[in-house]
Amino acid sequence: MTQIIKIDTSLNIIWQRTFGRSGWNNNPFNYVSLSPDSCYVVSGHYPVCASHHSIHGAEEYASCVRKIDDNGNLLWEKIIKNYNYQPRIYPHEDYWDVYVDEEGYIYYVGNGLNFDGFAGFLTKLSPNGDIMYRRSYTPTGNHNDYLAKLTCIKPTADGGLIMGGTTSDSYYGQFFNGYYQQPWLIKTDKDGLDGLCYTELPELDFDVFIPDTVCNLDTINCVVNISGPSAPYTLEFSTGQVIDSIYYPDVFVLKSTGIDVLLASSGMYDYTEYITEATLKDTVENIIARHYNIRTPRDPGEQQLAITLSDYYGNIKTIYKDIYVNPCHDLAVDENDNIMLSIYPNPATEYINIAGENIAGIEICNLLGGVVYEKQQCNGYNVISTDGMGAGSYFVRITMNDGKVVTKKIIVL
């Protein structure tokens, strides 16, 4: 376990806490930085698997960042797994120093496997521990990337960062059994631009893999890929759907590995994990790959779905998807009052979708008139859980902004 101790100026123990994976070597290297909210951010390691073929039973580690309050209580823990290559696939990463700026953003450095070999990393986290970006750096010249390490980070007077560590010159290394170390310094701005590995921020780009043909007023599971300079990202759809607070997943794999796969080591480490989302390592950029439930258009026929992505810096990009929408769900239309609503599925199992314009309130009653659900100030698309509703018939009563009321019977299974 990892132990953290707070002492006073006379070296008396105020409190001591233990964190980590019980019964494992959690690695003694931990670095602490004070955050502006009087909490502590601690960087270190988390043991994931161990070799059963080594006489030492050596562990392999994920990087780990924890935030604790002034009394030593754990606020959150972020474990970041960076996977090796096949066939010896297992997480491995070394993380070292950490710095928290005046706004609470967290920067920490380390080294591990990049898309084409070993590299030094700079990772930025939000104050809540979400991954905003990761930049990777390799030494210039004839250096052995495997021995390159970034071990410390400090702010600079111009608002940037300086990172330090060691590397090994492959020419001189031959005279010192391959371990001739040299200092390695990297100066960047606050966004990780160093003028060598990064001369400009990664370009904002994305795609949503939606089928060419869909049902109207449906929700379908789609894979979304996003790359860019920094999270959080926000997706906005012409259907009115908004997906915000999109950050990089805490699992890093090669782009060729992808997601929805079983990662299994066939080497000296007995380790497996099935991943459904990941950050894909690809050249200088990292790609978010994860599933989201995307809402389809209301009206049937040929439709063009507009999707807009924005990033942390305010950059915007829009793409368009030409899709054909089948009329799978009926629209409830009152021709005299020109009211168009959709209430589906019917019968319902886990949830009820209610979609339409100018909805002021929704009320669901049982056959005795008892109200089992009520909501005011509704939006155009509402998802209502059937938890707590017993199987049977119900009346959905929808009040429009102009005071008109539409009632429809629905069955819950």
Image (cartoon, helix red, strand yellow):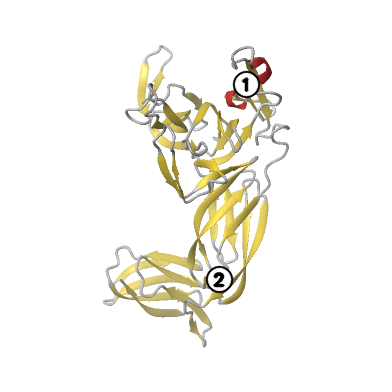
Q: Which mark is residue 313?
A: none
Which amino acid does the dot numbered 2 rest on? Thr
Residue 6 pos. (x, y %): 40, 21
Q: Which mark is residue 213?
A: 2
Residue wearing tag 1:
167
Residue 51 pos. (x, y %): 40, 29
Determine crowd level at label 2: few under 14, some 14-19, many 20+ residues with C-alpha closer than 10 A.
few
- Residue drawn where x is 37% and y is 67% of the image: 374
Q: Outermost residue toward the bottom?
A: 336
**In the depicted view, which residue is nearer to us: 166 or 156?**
166
Q: Looking at the image, is 204 positioned above or below residue 50?
A: below
Give the position of the N terminus as an image quadrant.
top left
Which amino acid does the dot numbered 1 rest on? Thr
Residue 382 pos. (x, y %): 45, 66
Q: Is residue 8 left or right of residue 120?
A: left
Q: Is residue 363 left or right of residue 126?
A: left
